[in-house]
Image (spheres, helix red, strand yellow):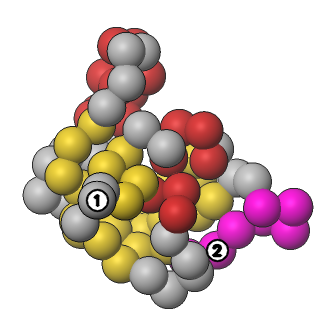
Amino acid sequence: MTKTLDTLKVGDKGTVVTLSGQHTSLRRRLLDMGLTPGTELEVLRYAPLGDPMEIMVRGYALTMRKDDAKLIEIA
């Protein structure tokens, strides 16, 4: 069973396996932000209401919506 980024808790780490979904423009944007297969990331925090989330990827903090994080499969 594969996990997606939106299921991780604060402090959890993972490695990007693939980006799924049919939204090619969103997929391209995520790749441009450094979320390529093999990239390690860590969940830093969630907003008080649970969305968006902030992750550490390639040495910088990236904030993204949980709907977008559902497209990122991790190991």
Disc 1 marks which residue? Answer: 1
Residue reaching furthest to the front:
1
Q: Which quadrant is the C terminus positioned in?
A: bottom left
The residue that disc 2 covers is 45
Within 10 Å of the Cα at label 1, are there few (<14), some (14-19), or many (20+) other Cα atoms?
Answer: few
- Report the magenta residues as a range: 44-50
Q: Residue at x 40, y 74 (%)?
A: 42
Instruction: Tell me which amino acid carries mark 1.
Output: Met
Q: Amino acid at mark 2?
A: Arg
First in sequence: mark 2 or mark 1?
1
| Residue 2 shows in this picture | yes
Give me the residue at 42% from left, 69% from top. 56
**Residue 50 has which mark?**
none
- Residue 34 seen anywhere in this rendered image of the structure: no
Query: Where's residue 69, x and y in %?
Result: 50, 46
Residue 1 image position (x, y, % from top left): 28, 59
Residue at 31% over, 32% down: 20
Is residue 73 one of those drawn in magenta? no
